Structure formats: C-alpha cells, structure tokens
Amino acid sequence: MDKKSKIIIGILIILVISLIAVNVFLTPSSVKSNENHTITDMANRSLTVPESVSKVVSTSPPITTILYMIAPDKLGGMNFQWTSDELKYVPSQYQNYPNIGGWYGTQTGNYEQFLATEPEIIFDSVDESGEVSDVEDRQKKFGSIPDVAVYDDTNITTMNSPIEFVGKVVGEESKAKELNEFNEKNINKVESVAKNIPDSERKKVYYAESTDGLSTDPSGSVHGQLIDLCGGKNVADIGNSNSSSSVQVSIEQVIKWNPDIIITTDSEFYNGVYNNSKWSNIKAVKNHQVYLSPSSPYKWFDRPVGANMIMGVPWTAKVIYPDKFKDINLKDETHEFYKEFYHIDLSDDQVTELLKNSGLNETNM
C-alpha cells in the first residue's frame, strides 16, 4: 500500500471516529437517562430517584390528580375508574390509564398492579402528623422503586408546596408553577372581597351530601372549606370540624337553618330537590338557589380534597356572591383551566353547558 493510500485511509478512520463522537454527544445516552440523584421527600426521608423520569404512579387520588394536571404523559395509572360522563372531558390519549387502586379511604391498592406499570417513582401520601410507617412498609414491597412521600395538603390556600415538590421531582417545574399561579390568582381575588363582607351580610350556605341531602360537613371542615374561603356562612355549626367524616342531620334541622344557598356534589339529590315537598319551603329551594358542583373529570368542590378544588374557588364565589364577584369571568377561567390542566380545549358551548348544568344562570357566569 502506497503512502497516498495510507493517508486516505487514515483520514477516513478519523472521520468515522468523529461521526461516532458527535452522535454520542448529541444523542441522549442510556447512561444519562439512568443517572440518579438524592432528594429529601416531604416526610424528610432521603431517597435516590432517577434524574430523568418518564413513568410515575401514586397511591393517593389527590397526588394522582396533580400528576394528571402537570404530567399526564408520565402518569402510569389511576386510583379509580373514570365514569362515562367524566371521560367526555378527558382526551382520548388519556382515557385508558389502568385502574391500580391505592391506599387511602378504600385501601384497594394491589402491589402487583402497581409494579406492572413499571414506574420509576411511586408517590405516596403523608398527612400533617408526619407518620411514615405505612410508607416504609410499602417501600419494602415496592423494592428498589423509590416510594416518595408527599404531604397530602387538604387546605386549598396552602397547596402550593406539594404541587411544587411533585413538579420538581417529575421535571415539570414550569407546569407546576402555572398551576400554583392560577390558584393564587383566584384565592387572592376571593379573599380580598370576602374579608370585607360584614357578618350580617354573609349568605347562609348548606352543603348537601348523599342522595337525600341529609349528610353534611360542619363549618371549619376541609370538605366545606370553599364556603368559608368565599365568605359564606356554613349553617352546619355542629359536629367535629376536624373529622373527615360527614355528619347526619334531619330535614327539620335544615329547615330550621333555612339556608340561602345549597351546594351539593350529588347529582341525584340535585335532580330531585325541586320536586321534593320536604325541601320546598327552604329559602334556597324556593329561590332556585341550589347548585351542583361540576364533576368532570374531577369534582370542583370536594371529595377528593385536593388540586381539583382549584377550579372550585371561582365557581363557589360566583355561586354565593355573583354580584360581588362580577370581575371573575367564569367562562374564561373554566376554558383556561381545562385547556392548561385538563388538557382539553373546550368550545364556548361546552363551557356554557358545563356551567349551566351546575345551576348557574348565564348572566352570572
């Protein structure tokens, strides 16, 4: 082989090596995607988690709801099954999440189902007590997959922290920030008005639960917190406000309270209340002031208590005090929230229908 040929071959070898090097630097490598880092979760536990995350699940509906809002393409499963009505507000690409249960009120979690989704991270919930024994037990069964504890905040005004934390762990800080900013905007607007409503002018509100409407949550309960936040007076001044369970009441007690407004999350109660003689003499019923919380794909008002209630803040304000909150355009708020956080771009007619079905007149939207 002559000298010229050797030089050409040498140049070709250098070019091939250069191309390989460029490809290595420009293409995400398996080494990069598998890099880990250490975090401190919201129960103050140190855990090693992947730097880049593509699949996560949660043991608790409130955290799953946050994940759906900020990272739907990374969510590997739901804790429940959406109904056919709820699926109308879910884009087709997100309608087939497997139902893997969870460990919360129903305790329907199945370790095999969780592991079958092949998650890189599992999010678990801890309450204000900080008790982590259940989380530690589940961590043992999840093996090497980190079970990251998130504070399951039930207060709509302090929910920013878990949203921000989850967003950081899954690499969606920007979307989490958008969600928090939407929440803060409406909370600030509502609180600035509600604090100036004299006690004598506060409307009396009853939260009707169950099909007969005779379960409720007392004033101060997290389940009725949107009433308090928006300046309403929860008439149910009974029971333990720290309890997560509703309180049974009689129709005679509701008649005695005689609320100006009734809010419910139960469609069966809502659809029958105006034709029910037992309720006919109550002020809210006589004045056609009964409202059904929108519930697709999640309830706006309650159960679960979580980020799904963010859209419930402006809705509840308009329900109780439409005149005091004229500067809230509920149609615009609904369209923005569904587009940005439920990932579906509703038409004007769809937004109007959603709000009308809740009992609102179009002039109060």
Image (tube, rainbow, N blue to C red):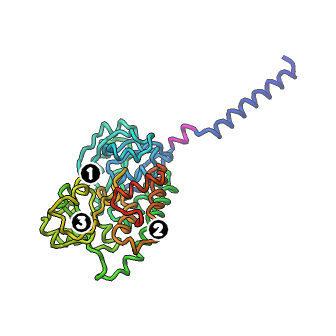
Provide the residue designation for mark 1: 104
Q: Which residues are magenta?
A: 29-34
Q: Residue 201: give its label.
A: none
Closest to the observer: 120 or 277? 277
The amino acid marked with disc number 1 is: Tyr
Give the mark nearest the N terminus, 3 or 1: 1
Residue 83 seen in the current view: yes
Horizontally, residue 68 falls left or right of residue 275, namely right
Residue shown at 52% from the left, 41% from the top: 33
Q: Secondary structure at mark 1?
A: loop
Q: What is the quadrant of the C terminus in the image?
A: bottom left
Q: Position of residue 322 (x, y in %)?
A: 38, 70
Residue shown at 65% from the left, 40% from the top: 26
The amino acid marked with disc number 2 is: Lys
**Is label 2 in contact with label 3 (beta carbons under 8 Å)?**
no
In this rendering, the answer to whether 196 lies above or below 291 is below
Q: Quadrant of residue 15?
A: top right
Q: Quadrant of residue 326?
A: bottom left
Give the mark nearest the N terminus, 2 or 1: 1
Q: CA distance from mark 3 to mark 1?
A: 35 Å
**Is label 3 in contact with label 1 (beta carbons under 8 Å)?**
no
Closest to the observer: 332 or 362? 362
Question: Badge 3: few (under 14), some or many (20 or more) residues near its Cα, within 10 Å?
Answer: many
Provide the residue designation for mark 3: 285
> Main SS type for the magenta part?
helix
Residue 33 highlighted magenta (yes or no)? yes
Q: CA distance from mark 2 to mark 3?
A: 32 Å
In this rendering, the answer to whether 92 lies above or below 171 is above
Question: Badge 1: few (under 14), some or many (20 or more) residues near its Cα, within 10 Å?
Answer: some
**Is label 2 in contact with label 1 (beta carbons under 8 Å)?**
no
The amino acid marked with disc number 3 is: Val
Provide the residue designation for mark 2: 185
